[in-house]
Image (cartoon, coloured by chain):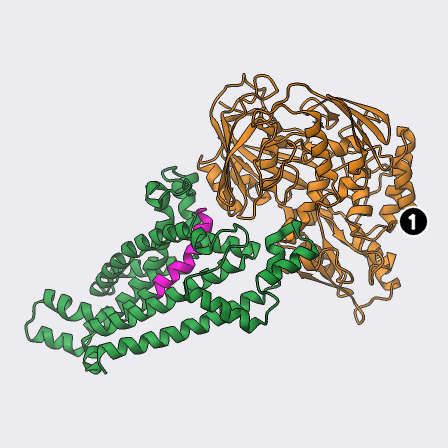
């Protein structure tokens, strides 16, 4: 269940949310890169069923608010919508959400007015009880996977104001709250919704059938609130057991779109004139985690040496077939505050060796540790890292790579096992920092209750409404993290999908979710 | 020893092998670093319901007791419930078994006669251009793994050069594989190409040996027609080793189907096995491993008996 456990993280917060846009205006799009250009869209055409392929298995689920794997994310996005979403500039927006407006009374009080006339797939009109129920389910401490949102909002903090309005009273100020509620998994369901009950949402397509590991079919929601949409009659999600079969099916014209194309197969797809590749780098990371309070990583010199010794471009080439961009141990490249210090993690092998020597390591007494990773957790990165450290250190460091089948159960975040790998979908700096500090304390940088300055600045920044002051605090956090942190972030991964030219309405724009945010619930998509 | 006793003896050996296989499968799979209760409950797991489920599944019992319980259920035809689908293993795998059986059966029906004819003809035309080129070709195919052959077929016939056949198989819920005849062409061709080299090369070697034997020479000297020499004397005697290799090939087809089904996204037991291993669905893994083991035992048993029946020398020994 390793991928499950890891994806639980995604459920709550692992998808991209842009930094505090509604509160602090003017966030840019630094760090975004795209491949290829898209032609101006033609007039949408109605009808047809879009066939989307994705790797999945018998453990796929459908739940409006929880998910384990990418296939679950896809199905969730087809049938359900949240209060807010992200616009083309990654700003939290109500355009595609069910909220009409959001008023920020204070950093711990948000008043939300809902759109009127929203109908569920079963014909029931959405009311405030449904909205309150949905959010109670999202933050219910008895339900698993709620700790991301639950640390800011309790069920008691939800209060109905009138038939169309409610308020969220947070447990603590949070300047990034709008980005949190804009995440795709924070959706609205009817009162009484359960995973095992009828799968009813407000999205543009309603579920018709679902066979885990095989396929699901979704048909047009006739009374969908967004006038004239969706264009398609339906969506068929087809499971594949491997990415090879997925890409082959796309190239053979058996599916219209493939979600999650491996970097190594991109050139093959691009050669086909009937195919388009969507490739974005919004800041997905696959860090190597060095728990800073455990030997040998409790010696700062060791962490610094491991950062300095590697050739990041080479890791990208070896592990990602070149499809990524260099990162400097920082994260959140779309955040306006990204790399405020201009820190560059340059390769400096002599200095790295000097640091290791100063830390007491030599050929006769080498630095030894195991780097654990999962087969679904970019094992090539761990292999490339270990290979470089071992060869460049000339025997002063010996890193072994361990890839156990139960990685997520026994090694990930386990005590005193060595180093390990993780991954995070892109999100703003403070949201990512919050995840690291309070939800998944991978590096043990600043545990709750500690006097660590990183935590102090984090809490101050969350409660700081003035953008300039927040920026200054984030800058301090980054500088501290660069020197003292336990992450080695060699690169930002590209998210890669492909589709046939018959599919229209998908664009290459910043998106943390695959396939142009799944065509915004596929309501923007049509078949030419 | 009569042929009847011989069959009974082989059956007893087969049964013993199956029991040993079942024990190996059970203890190895139960020894996997996985908690079935956690697999079933997933992220809804709490310490309390994990404990309760472990008791329901009998995981708190000694391993030996669990094994005999499982074996008794298997003998009764109860293969347990899939952890992930929550369906009985037989219900879940029934249609998939039919799908796999279809491509394996067609693969066998197509590959065995082709292999016999090819091998026999190569032996007759020994050292000719046909023989050497066929030997080279079969050697190349024998050296290629299934996924390479399958990928090559996909590139040539489905995606890049021509688009004559589908690259993967989509079967609607409950649909039979023959409802998509075009879809199964490439998976079956891959299996056939995987089988032909071994059987044809064995047939060639066996036929060459028989054709050089004294009794063939004697038959020719007696003036028996070449047609009769080949069909009545050479061919039956050459089949003995071929049966053994064919049996291994049929058993291989079950294993080879795992790769082929994954490559072509074919909904058979092979893809079910890879999925079950990924999600650690122990009842499915155990059933399919036992099934593959049983196919090996059964096909070898049939091959042993068939070898005796078609080989006059061996038949005589039993009498």
Q: In which quarter of the image is the C terminus of chain B?
A: bottom left
Q: In which quarter of the image is residue A134?
A: top right
Residue B15 in the image, given as x and y percentages of width and height: 38, 73
Q: Nearer the viewer, residue B50 or A466?
A: B50
Relative to A467, B104 lies left or right: left
- Residue range in magenta is B248-266
Q: Quadrant of residue B122?
A: bottom left
Residue A56 in the image, given as x and y percentages of width and height: 54, 45
* Residue named by callout 1: A452
Check if residue B250 falls in the magenta segment: yes
Q: Which residue is drawn at 46% across and 39% down?
A: A249
Q: Residue at x 61, y 19 (%)?
A: A226
Relative to A390, A240 lies left or right: left
Q: Is mark 1 on a helix, strand or loop?
A: loop
Q: Quadrant of the N terminus of chain B?
A: bottom left
Query: In the rendered picture, chain B carries what hue?
Result: green
Q: How many labels does the image show?
A: 1
Considering only vertical position in the picture, is A395 above or below A230? below
Q: Which chain is orange?
A: A
Chain under callout 1: A
Residue A511 in the image, given as x and y percentages of width and height: 67, 32
Q: Which of A519 and A140 is in front in this view?
A: A140
Q: Which residue lies furthest to the left in this view?
A: B223
Q: In which quarter of the image is residue A326?
A: top right
**Is residue A50 visible from the viewing direction of this image?**
yes
Q: Nearer the viewer, residue A468 or A20?
A: A20
Considering only vertical position in the picture, is A10 above or below A224? below
Q: Which residue is drawn at 73% across and 56% down?
A: A420
Check if residue A63 falls in the magenta segment: no
Residue A453 in the image, given as x and y percentages of width and height: 92, 46
Query: Magenta region's main secondary structure?
Result: helix
**Is residue B259 visible from the viewing direction of this image?**
no
């Amino acid at each position: 269940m390793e991928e499950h456990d890891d994806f639980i993280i995604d459920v709550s917060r692992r998808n991209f949310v842009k930094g505090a846009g509604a509160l602090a205006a003017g966030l840019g799009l630094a760090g975004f890169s795209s491949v290829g250009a898209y032609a101006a869209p033609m007039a949408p055409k109605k009808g047809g069923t879009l066939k989307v392929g994705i790797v999945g298995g018998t453990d796929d689920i459908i739940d409006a608010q929880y998910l384990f794997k990418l296939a679950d994310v896809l199905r969730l996005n087809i049938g359900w919508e949240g209060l807010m979403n992200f616009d083309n500039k990654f700003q939290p927006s109500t355009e595609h959400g069910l909220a009409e407006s959001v008023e920020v009374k204070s950093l711990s009080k948000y008043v939300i007015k809902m759109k009127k006339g929203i109908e569920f797939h079963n014909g029931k009109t959405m009311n405030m009880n449904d909205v309150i129920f949905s959010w109670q389910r999202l933050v219910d401490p008895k339900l698993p996977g709620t700790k991301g949102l639950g640390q800011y909002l309790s069920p008691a903090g939800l209060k109905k104001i009138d038939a169309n309005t409610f308020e969220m009273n947070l447990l603590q100020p949070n300047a990034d709250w709008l980005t949190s509620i804009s995440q795709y998994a924070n959706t609205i369901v009817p009162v009484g919704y359960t995973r095992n009950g009828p799968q009813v949402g407000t999205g543009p397509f309603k579920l018709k059938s679902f066979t885990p590991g095989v396929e699901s079919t979704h048909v047009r929601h006739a009374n969908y609130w967004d006038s004239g949409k969706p264009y398609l009659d339906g969506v068929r999600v087809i499971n594949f057991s491997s990415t090879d079969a997925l890409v082959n099916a796309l190239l053979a014209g058996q599916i219209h779109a493939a979600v999650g194309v491996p970097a190594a197969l991109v050139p093959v797809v691009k050669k086909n004139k009937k195919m388009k590749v969507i490739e974005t780098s919004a800041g997905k990371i696959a860090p190597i985690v060095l728990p800073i309070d455990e030997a040998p990583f409790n010696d700062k010199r060791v962490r610094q040496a491991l950062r300095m010794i590697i050739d990041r471009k080479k890791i990208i080439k070896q592990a990602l077939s070149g499809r990524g961009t260099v990162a400097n141990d920082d994260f959140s490249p779309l955040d306006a505050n990204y790399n405020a210090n201009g820190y560059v993690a340059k390769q400096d092998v002599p200095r790295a060796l000097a640091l290791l020597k100063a830390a007491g390591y030599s050929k006769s007494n080498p630095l030894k540790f195991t780097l654990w990773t999962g087969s679904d957790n970019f094992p090539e990165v761990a292999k490339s890292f270990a290979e470089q450290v071992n060869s460049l250190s000339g025997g002063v460091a010996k890193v072994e790579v361990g890839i156990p089948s139960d990685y997520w159960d026994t090694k990930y975040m386990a005590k005193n096992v060595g180093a390990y790998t993780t991954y995070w979908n892109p999100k703003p700096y403070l949201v990512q920092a919050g995840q690291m500090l309070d939800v998944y304390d991978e590096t043990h940088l600043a545990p709750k209750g500690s006097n660590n300055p990183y935590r102090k600045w984090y809490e101050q920044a969350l409660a700081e409404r003035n953008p300039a002051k927040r920026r200054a605090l984030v800058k301090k956090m980054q500088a501290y993290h660069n020197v003292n942190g336990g992450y080695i972030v060699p690169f930002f991964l590209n998210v890669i999908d492909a589709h046939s030219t018959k599919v229209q309405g998908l664009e290459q724009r910043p998106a943390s979710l695959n396939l142009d945010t799944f065509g915004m619930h596929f309501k923007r998509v049509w078949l030419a | 020893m009569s042929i009847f006793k011989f069959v009974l003896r082989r059956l007893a050996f087969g049964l013993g092998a199956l029991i040993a296989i079942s024990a190996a499968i059970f203890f190895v799979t139960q020894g996997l670093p996985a908690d079935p209760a956690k697999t079933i409950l997933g992220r809804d797991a709490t310490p309390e319901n994990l404990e309760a489920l472990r008791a329901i599944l009998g995981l708190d019992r000694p391993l030996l007791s669990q094994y005999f319980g499982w074996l008794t259920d298997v003998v009764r035809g109860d293969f347990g419930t899939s952890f992930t689908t929550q369906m009985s293993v037989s219900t879940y795998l029934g249609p998939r078994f039919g799908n796999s059986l279809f491509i394996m059966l067609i693969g066998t029906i197509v590959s065995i006669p082709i292999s016999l004819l090819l091998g026999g003809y190569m032996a007759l035309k020994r050292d000719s251009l046909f023989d050497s080129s066929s030997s080279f070709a079969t050697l190349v195919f024998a050296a290629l793994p299934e996924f390479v052959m399958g990928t090559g077929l996909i590139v040539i016939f489905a995606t890049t050069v021509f688009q004559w056949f589908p690259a993967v198989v989509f079967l609607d819920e409950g649909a039979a594989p023959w409802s998509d005849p075009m879809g199964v062409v490439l998976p079956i061709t891959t299996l056939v190409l995987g089988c032909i080299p071994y059987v044809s090369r064995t047939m060639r070697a066996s036929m060459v040996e028989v054709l050089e034997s004294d009794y063939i020479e004697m038959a020719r000297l007696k003036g028996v027609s070449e047609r009769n020499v080949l069909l009545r004397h050479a061919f039956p005697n050459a089949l003995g080793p071929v049966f053994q290799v064919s049996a291994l090939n049929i058993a291989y087809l079950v294993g080879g189907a795992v790769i082929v089904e994954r490559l072509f996204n074919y909904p058979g037991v092979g893809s079910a096995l890879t999925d079950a291993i990924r999600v650690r669905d122990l009842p499915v893994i155990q059933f399919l491993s036992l099934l593959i083991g049983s196919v090996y035992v059964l096909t070898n048993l049939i091959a042993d008996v068939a070898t005796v029946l078609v080989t006059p020398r061996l038949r005589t020994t039993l009498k």
